[in-house]
Amino acid sequence: MKRIVFFGVITDFIQIVFTVFCIFFIPLSEHITLESLVSNRDTKIIVVFLINIVTFAGFIVIFFIEIKRELWLIQHFDYSKKYSSVHLATYKQRYPQLFEDLTDLNWKYYIIYRICKYIYLFNFCFTAIIVFGFYFQSYKTITNFLMSFWFCFSKLNKGCVVAKESLDNSIGYSFYNTVNLSFNRIEVKYKRHVSNSDVIDSLNSSFRSIPGVLELETHL
């Protein structure tokens, strides 16, 4: 699963670079080239570039939280075809701290996607005004621009859905899975870790309950 996550992140990252900074890659008017956009220091292009930078920074935060969340889900949860997507919630009472951490991750995940969605929509609208108002070439400009928009918006929209579903139902939907995989049971290794911790705590409690031990610890 980790390979799927990292492959998905790398693929998305490359596409995000080309789509967020699409004004530098889509066909513009004939007298405009990438070199001229960079060298002429046009105020309009500088403003677009700064807005692109802010948008790209938002996606970087998304990738950071997304990778952290996906690896955390893989470490603590597992998937089985025998259970439904909401089966994970049945473990809530047994592992309360685990679900507190899950809720915190899902909340951060949802908030950053919502914020970036609005930032990108502003970025798209402003860039569209500049492109079609000053640098429009032909139908190729329109198709390339809309394709760039569709990729970013579809990623943001899917992220919002995954995060909202996960947050509302206390589950762990994985973003990087073609079948919308939802982790639906506790990872066996985590169960063993918790069980071992419970045994140690129980032994410590039993040991402290032996007459004279508490008094000895107090003197120490």
Image (cartoon, rainbow, N blue to C red):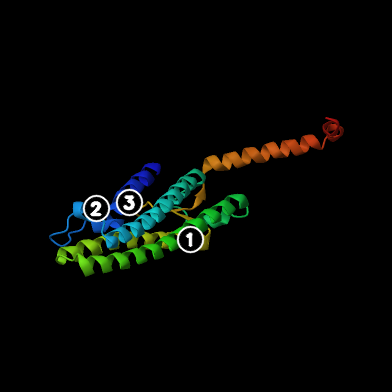
Residue bearing mark 3: 12
Compared with 31, 8 (above or below) is: above
Label 3 neighbour load within 10 Å: few <14, some 14-19, many 20+: some
Which comes before the other along the chain, label 1 or label 3?
3
Compared with 201, 110 (above or below) is: below
Which comes before the other along the chain, label 2 or label 1?
2
Which comes before the other along the chain, label 2 or label 3?
3
- Amino acid type at mark 3: Asp
Residue bearing mark 1: 111
Toward the viewer: 214 or 144?
144
Label 1 neighbour load within 10 Å: few <14, some 14-19, many 20+: some
Which type of secondary structure does the marked residue at label 1 adopt?
helix
Can you give x and y, in whole percent of width and height, for residue 96 in the image?
62, 52
Q: Quadrant of residue 115?
A: bottom left
Can you give x and y, in whole percent of width and height, for residue 6 in the image?
37, 44
Where's the C terminus, which quadrant?
top right
Can you give x and y, in whole percent of width and height, for residue 78 in the image?
47, 47
Label 2 neighbour load within 10 Å: few <14, some 14-19, many 20+: few
Residue bearing mark 2: 38
Compared with 218, 34 (above or below) is: below
- Seen at 66% across and 41% down, the residue is 198
- Residue 165 shows which numbered tag? none
- Seen at 58% across and 39% down, the residue is 192
Toward the viewer: 32 or 52?
32
- Evaluate if marks 1 and 3 touch, with contact meaning CB atoms under 8 Å apart: no
- Amino acid type at mark 1: Ile
